[in-house]
Amino acid sequence: MKRIWSKGASILLMSAMVGGLLIGCTNTPGTGDGGEGKEGETSYKLKILHNWNGSSGSDNGMTPVEQVIKEKTGVTLEWEYTKGSETEKVNQIFATQNLPDIYTGPAWGGELDGIIKAAKEGQLVDISDKLSNYPNLMKSIAPENVPPALYEKAIDAYDGKKYLLLQNQPATNEDGMDWLYGFYVRKDIAEKLGVDPQSVKTKEDFYNFLKKIKDANLQENGQPVFPLGGFSNGWAVGIGNTMFYSGASYVDKGDGTVEHNFFTKGYEEYTLFYRKLIEEGLLDPETFTQTDPIAKEKINQGRIAILAAHYPAILDASKEYASAHPGSEFVPLGPLERADVEPDRPVDLAIQGNNVTAITKNCKGECVDAALKFLDFMASDEGFMLARYGVEGVHWEMKDGKPVAIQEWFDKFSTDTNMKLRKNEGISIGLESLTGLDRINSAAGGDIWADQERVAAMENARKILRPNGIHVITAYNPGDVITKAPEWEMLKPSMDRMGDAWKEAVFAKSDEAALSIINELREQLRNTGYDQAMKFTNDNLKGKDIVTVQMPN
Amino acid sequence: MKNRLENSRLWKKIWQHKLFYLFMLPGIVWFFLFSYVPLYGIQVAFRDYTFIGGFTGSPWAGFKYFEQFFNYYQSGDIIRNTVIISLMKLLIGFPMPIILALLLNEVRKIRFKKTIQTLSYLPYFVSWIVVVTLMQRLLTPYGGPVNDVLSMLGADPIQFLNNPTWFYQMIVGSDIWKNIGWNSIIFMAAIAGIDQQLYEAAKMDGAGRFRQMWHITLPGIRNVAIILFILAVGNLMSAGYEQLLLLNGPATASIGSVLDVHAINSGIREGRLSYAAAVGLFQSIIGLILILTVNRIARKVSDVSLF
């Protein structure tokens, strides 16, 4: 009897294990799969991949903002957020065919290349014949609203078909977001060392200031203070490049053609300058390998004297330390000299759409119409303000034709440091990536949730760092043209190595070793068709206005 | 006739021990699903993979991606780094679990032995991301406890990570720490299977504990060690993806860039799936050749082999 029980139990166990293995390998369709998201007469469920690393949504299911969207468009949303590399995510979803209904993500780099490849290989829905029914979407990709090279590369690149929508490009100049990238120093440290942050102008001044901080042997909680640091994976310590060359990826050779900055003398000087900073302990050696929490921990412990990044990120990261240590807030350094440009030149900023959206082939029939209706609503003025400000009458109201925050919510949001409260209401959950042209000032009266102290700090930094104003770049970017060269497939892997090669050179044992790393890659670039691809690019850009000067934004 | 008879005997034997064979079933299904079914994907290495064509519909590309790999300016360095790191792990890391198993076998206090065994297994279950984060916290020269102790002893702080001088020590050391306990299980099992009468006889002949270990325990686990060594040699072209991805930095790239990370980066980060498949296939073919070679050598030298 005992034996029978034992046998029975064994067989049951085996069956469960094998069954589990097999079930685990099967693909169960989710709610949005196959575009079969119809929930009832009045609702259609769409699965959206918000491909921005670190983005997140509400903890409480459907938010009040999403409830309004459901009422207006009949669409309910199921979100997926990316944790990790956005480029990897794009490649992964198309390689595994685990597709959302709507994809939305960065309009640059490998992410954009991946989504363009997907469009060319039949993975996205052609919306060209339906666009005329959706005026807000049409407007967002009208030729006059998209930078020309980007239009040719991503929007109008498929023999008359249309797959991608672009978002967040400024509707007017006043809507252009200047993130105020730069070097920012702790005010108390500058004062302690007797250095006026605005007196630091040249690269020599910058180096001397870092050296002065190092020599002061500053300590915070028993730990040394690094003269210069950044955020995760080295962001954005490399922005000192504009002191060595014009800052654009492709620079003017002086003969009417352009070349990649990687081949310039300025790039070598830039690399060797940073190598010196690492060698002399002026730049945090962990900055290129550290994670975001470790980077922020250092800032919060007061262990970084000068930070390189955009100002909003610096204000957010240093908020806690600055409120506990009054007078220790980060203030702008410089403005630092710019190489190869007139000193009174306005700052050249690329303020173009940062987001592309597409409907994938997973969405078919009714799903496409539901998706377009939803996206068109989000791109309307009503959708724009809903995504940014919340529900009218609940979170904000119109006064004298302008949106004004309801005080109760303004007070709540002003203490909402981790954004959880906002997200639970449906603000900053990814909908802001879908709202067409950015018209935060021209149509939405300015950000109603902005913290006044922060606005004042940004204004102060703007006055210091932009004494000659800004110039919004509208010219052709050679980087968008070179991708059409026949050699691009061979060349791209070598181009993708540039960032890594620069970091390796910065950590090289000697200047010679650093230059050898750069030169080896230059040779590889030439061997994989760089010269031919550049000729193609220059030929295609002949007579056109080209971006050859650019500051980070 | 003879063959048919042998076949029928084999089936009879299998039926007699059906319960044991049933226990093998999940393993067989697992191998079939995860090791044999994906083999059809190898063809991607010889195709220009497109999303729309998939594995079977993409156009043939011949050896284009293998050529690209061998023409890549760093392919020589990457292969060299992979072999060096793998060899170090093999030569230094392989004997470690044997030593641990031998040491544990000599421990007489069962409770102490079990505690040490359990503690040594634990790191195996910790993911590399956690291990590397721990290493970063413990070894940083800026407030890490290891460097604090060094400075208390009057030594200068040491940058252990992202430093070519300490790179191999960190890679091999962390690999041993993570896997030593788990890998020792099989040797512990082999030791447990040694006939106790041999030890009794050796004791009566006056053999001390070291002599017993040398003449009984070590020969007793010799065959298992050879089999595991042959299998380990097959992984010589694979230095460990997660560990190297996390522990290799810009300062150590010249000695720390390996095939596994190169393949994954090319495939997932750059979207060059055919190229990544070609690199992966190259690793597998070299691995297979190594296994066949070492297996043959082992059979000639010691009569022990996989097949």
Image (tube, helix red, strand yellow):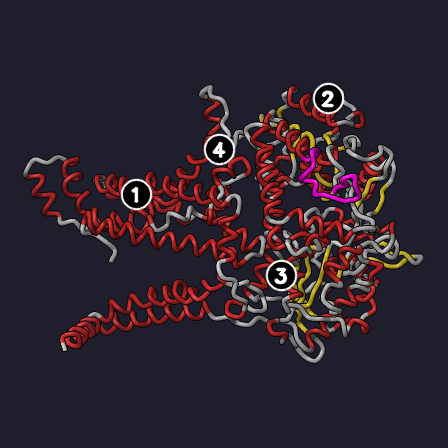
Disc 3 vs disc 1: which is toward the camera?
1
For mark 2, what is the residue?
A192
**Chain letter, disc 1 residue:** B
Cβ atoms under marks 3 and 4 closer than 8 Å: no
Which mark, by number, is residue A294?
none
Which mark, by number, is residue B164?
4
- Secondary structure of the residue carrying tag 2 is helix
Residue type pointed to by label 2: Lys
Q: Is residue A531 left or right of residue B303?
A: right
Same chain? Circles 4 and 2: no
Q: Nearer the viewer, residue A228 or A61?
A: A228
The earlier-in-sequence mark between 2 and 3 is 3
Mark-to-mark CA distance, 4 and 2: 37 Å
Residue type pointed to by label 4: Pro
Residue A178's image quarter? Answer: top right
Residue located farthest toward the right when viewing the structure as drawn: A400
Residue type pointed to by label 1: Pro
Disc 4 vs disc 2: which is toward the camera?
4
- Against A328, residue A405 (above or below) is below
Q: Nearer the viewer, residue B266 or A463?
A: B266
Q: Quadrant of the C terminus of chain A?
A: top right
Mark-to-mark CA distance, 3 and 1: 43 Å
The part of the chain drawn in magenta is A251-267
For mark 3, what is the residue?
A80
- Answer whether residue B264 is magenta in the image: no
